[in-house]
């Protein structure tokens, strides 16, 4: 049985202009717990899942009880409706498997399906997808077309400005034009090329220089497409500067490592000033209902609490608070009461 998760009053068939600020997909980081954590900070930003391999989805759905809580498929793509607007990011190069993933994304209540054409890891290259697909725009087009036919959700692509020696602006433009003609209208562009050999994924996020001007040129020459810039953005003011020329900004590491740095994102970027900016204590407290539900299905607290160590930084006692949370939440039997105590300590200090 597949579920329809569309109970949140979210926008069906798309996520409005949530893409103006999005949190980049990050394997091991942007899991369902971190996404709910960030939802305590921003109601409107577009969130992405970690990359899920289309083939893994295909296998998972064959398992008995796959869609039930804790089942194989639910573990891969289950989420809380409060996480929306939410995009499912998939990896793959087989149009049929990607079409199947797009159908699943719709059935499970996602707002968008996004294809990863940016990951340079060796494992992903062996599967012939991720960034190496930039060398084969017609294949990406076939994938996008199959996904768009299978699902009414917007199909978007996250990619690099180039790979290896294929790094000219003309090649970037040709890639985008080919993929746009197949049905993708929104592109999240990591403004760095990737070296497929010689650099590991971490080095590929730091060593190739950021070239924002190429992404800006792309937007200037293709004004009808929605173009988001990703890579190296550190602050809200960095983002606002880019938003003068681009449709959206996507931030990864600086959101994960400093979530409260973005407390004004709803007011400053999404134009919603109706809620007070989140504080560390409101983030921790806001996760307690989720922790209760999660524990009641027999799962441990730690996968939730591990993300919280980043919400307290730059104040005296931060290290002590983090150490205590790590110790207490790491215990096998730890439950929501650990978060309650951690929130109380922060409230006493007005944090
Ligand atoms: C730990 C980690 C995991 C990542 N996993 C993914 C992923 O699953 N899919 C993807 O498209 N990009 C992934 N990325 C790349 C980010 O989405 C983003 O493009 C990159 O970090 C540059 O943005 P930033 O400078 O704002 O972090 C990952 C990055 C990091 C640091």
Image (cartoon, rainbow, N blue to C red):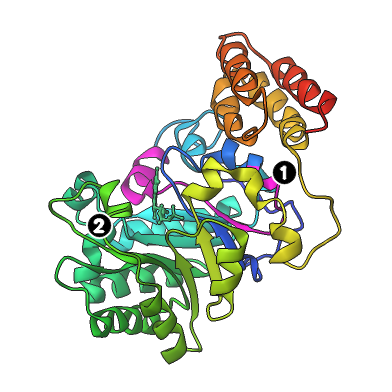
> Vertical placement of 172 versus 198: above or below?
below
The location of residue 159, given as percent across then percent down, is 35, 65
Label 2 C-beta lies within 8 Å of the nearest ligand 1 atom: no
For residue 350: magenta? no
Left or right side of 74 for 328: right
Identify the element where label 1 is drawn.
loop
**Magenta stretch, residue numbers:** 38-61
Labelled disc at residue 100: none
Q: Can residue 19 be seen in this view?
A: no
Quadrant location of the N terminus in the rendered image: top right
Left or right side of 297 for 128: left
The location of residue 302, given as percent across then percent down, is 56, 21
Q: Nearer the viewer, residue 347 or 170?
A: 347
Q: Nearer the viewer, residue 15 or 343?
A: 343
Please give the name of the residue rendered at 35% of the width and 78% of the height, measured from the top-left corner.
179
Left or right side of 111 for 339: right
Residue under pointer 1: 40
Residue under pointer 2: 129
For residue 44: magenta? yes
> Vertical placement of 182 versus 312: above or below?
below
> Vertical placement of 178 versus 272: above or below?
below
Please give the name of the residue rendered at 60% of the width and 26% of the height, measured from the top-left corner.
305
Identify the element where label 2 is drawn.
loop
Residue 94 falls in image quadrant: bottom left
């Amino acid at each position: 049985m597949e579920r329809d998760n569309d109970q949140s009053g979210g926008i069906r068939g798309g996520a409005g202009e949530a893409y103006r600020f999005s949190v980049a997909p990050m394997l091991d980081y942007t899991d369902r717990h971190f996404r709910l954590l960030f939802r305590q900070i921003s109601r409107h930003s577009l969130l992405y899942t970690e990359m899920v391999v289309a083939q893994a989805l295909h296998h998972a759905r064959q398992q008995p009880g796959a869609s039930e809580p804790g089942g194989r498929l639910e573990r891969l793509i289950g989420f809380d409706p409060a996480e929306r607007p939410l995009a499912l990011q998939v990896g793959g190069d087989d149009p049929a498997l990607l079409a199947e993933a797009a159908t699943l994304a719709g059935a499970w209540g996602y707002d968008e399906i996004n294809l990863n054409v940016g990951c340079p890891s060796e494992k992903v290259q062996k599967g012939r997808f991720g960034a190496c697909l930039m060398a084969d725009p017609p294949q990406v087009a076939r994938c996008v077309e199959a996904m768009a036919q299978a699902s009414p959700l917007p199909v978007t692509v996250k990619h690099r400005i180039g790979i290896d020696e294929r790094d000219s602006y003309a090649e970037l433009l040709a890639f985008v034009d080919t993929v746009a003609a197949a049905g993708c209208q929104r592109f999240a562009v990591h403004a760095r090329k990737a070296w497929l050999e010689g650099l590991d994924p971490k080095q590929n996020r730091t060593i190739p220089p950021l070239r924002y001007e190429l992404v800006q040129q792309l937007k200037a020459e293709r004004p009808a497409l929605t173009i988001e810039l990703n890579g190296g953005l550190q602050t809200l003011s960095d983002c606002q500067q880019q938003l003068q020329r681009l449709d959206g900004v996507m931030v990864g590491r600086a959101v994960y490592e400093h979530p409260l740095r973005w407390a004004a994102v709803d007011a400053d970027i999404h134009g919603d000033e109706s809620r007070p900016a989140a504080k560390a204590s409101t983030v921790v407290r806001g996760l307690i209902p989720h922790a209760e539900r999660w524990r009641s299905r027999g799962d441990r607290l730690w996968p939730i609490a591990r993300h919280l160590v980043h919400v307290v930084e730059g104040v005296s006692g931060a290290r002590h608070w983090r150490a205590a949370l790590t110790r207490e939440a790491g215990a096998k039997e730890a439950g929501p009461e650990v978060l309650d105590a951690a929130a109380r300590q922060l409230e006493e200090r007005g944090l």
